[in-house]
C-alpha cells in the first residue's frame, strides 16, 4: 500500500512544495546558465521502473566543446566552474523534481542508470527496477561513487526489500546531512564512475 499508493502521493506533494519553495533558486540557476552558456537543461534517457525508459532532467554542467576531429573533449575539460558548484551542492539534480511530478521518478529509490547496461544485469540486479528510481537513494547516503558496483546493487536490492515510510525518511534525512557536509561530499562526487561491465 505504501509503495504503490501513499508514497506516490507524498512524492508529488513534496516535489510540488519543494519546487515552489525553491523556485527563486531554480530561476537564478536558469538565468546564470542561460547567460554563461545558453544551455540550461541536460536531458538523457534512463531506465525506470519495470525497465521503462524515460527522459531524466538535470541542469547542464558541461559544455559541448570538441577537439579538431569533432570528438567531445573529456568531462574534466568540459565541466564549467559553475557546473562544478552545481554538482558539489547537488543542485544540478533539482529539475528531477519535474520527473517526480511526471510520475517516472520518486524522491527516494535506486538511482536510474543508462539503458546501455540493461542487457548486463542478472536477475538479482534487476530487482532494483521493481520500484521507481529516486532523486536520492540508499547508495547516495552510503558512499555514492566510492562504492563498487557490487556494493551499489546490494544496497539497491536491500532498499527494494525493505521499502517503507520510515526508511525513506531516514534516507532523506541522511541526504540532507551529506549535502551540508562538503568535506564528506566532495571526495565522493569527484570519483569518476567506472562503466558497468556485468558481473556475477
Image (cartoon, helix red, strand yellow):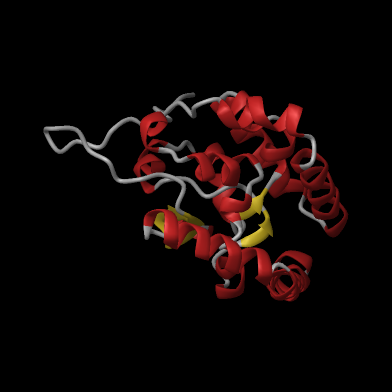
Across and down, in percent, residue 133 comes to 59, 55
Q: Residue furthest front?
A: 35
Measuring 51% from the left and 39% from the top, which residue is drawn there? 81
44 versus 15 height, above or below: above
Across and down, in percent, residue 82 comes to 53, 45
Task: Give the mark count.
Answer: 0
Across and down, in percent, residue 137 comes to 69, 46
Instruction: Say left or right for 96 vs 176.
Output: left
Measuring 83% from the left and 42% from the top, which residue is drawn there? 177
Question: Does the image show residue 115?
Answer: yes
Instruction: Say left or right for 78 vs 95.
Output: left
Q: Quadrant of residue 42?
A: bottom left
Instruction: From the viewer's side, name the closer residue of 193 and 154.
Output: 193
Instruction: From the viewer's side, name the closer residue of 73 and 7.
Output: 73
Measuring 43% from the left and 62% from the top, which residue is drawn there? 34
23 versus 49 height, above or below: below
Instruction: From the viewer's side, name the closer residue of 68 and 150.
Output: 68
In which quadrant is the N terminus drawn?
A: bottom right
Question: Does the image show residue 147?
Answer: no
Across and down, in percent, residue 10 comes to 77, 72
Q: Residue furthest right?
A: 166
Measuring 11% from the left and 33% from the top, which residue is drawn there? 69
74 versus 9 height, above or below: above
Q: Residue furthest left?
A: 69
Q: Quadrant of residue 120?
A: top left
Instruction: Say left or right for 87 vs 185.
Output: left
Amino acid at each position: 500500500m505504501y509503495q504503490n499508493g501513499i508514497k506516490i502521493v507524498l512524492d508529488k506533494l513534496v516535489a510540488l512544495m519543494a519546487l515552489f519553495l525553491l523556485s527563486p533558486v531554480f530561476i537564478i540557476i536558469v538565468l546564470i546558465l542561460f547567460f554563461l552558456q545558453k544551455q540550461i537543461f541536460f536531458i538523457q534517457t534512463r531506465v525506470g521502473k519495470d525497465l521503462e525508459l524515460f527522459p531524466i532532467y538535470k541542469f547542464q554542467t558541461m559544455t559541448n566543446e570538441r577537439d579538431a576531429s569533432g570528438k567531445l573533449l573529456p568531462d574534466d575539460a568540459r565541466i564549467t566552474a559553475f557546473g562544478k558548484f552545481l554538482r558539489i551542492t547537488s543542485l544540478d539534480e533539482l529539475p528531477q523534481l519535474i520527473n517526480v511530478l511526471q510520475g517516472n521518478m520518486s524522491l527516494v529509490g535506486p538511482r536510474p542508470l543508462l539503458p546501455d547496461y540493461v542487457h548486463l544485469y542478472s536477475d538479482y540486479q534487476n530487482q532494483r527496477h521493481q520500484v521507481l528510481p529516486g532523486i536520492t537513494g540508499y547508495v547516495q547516503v552510503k558512499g555514492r561513487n566510492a562504492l563498487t558496483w557490487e556494493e551499489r546493487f546490494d544496497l539497491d536490492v536491500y532498499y527494494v526489500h525493505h521499502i517503507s515510510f520510515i526508511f525513506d525518511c531516514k534516507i532523506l534525512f541522511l541526504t540532507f546531512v551529506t549535502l551540508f557536509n562538503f568535506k564528506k561530499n566532495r571526495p565522493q562526487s569527484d570519483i569518476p564512475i567506472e562503466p558497468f561491465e556485468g558481473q556475477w
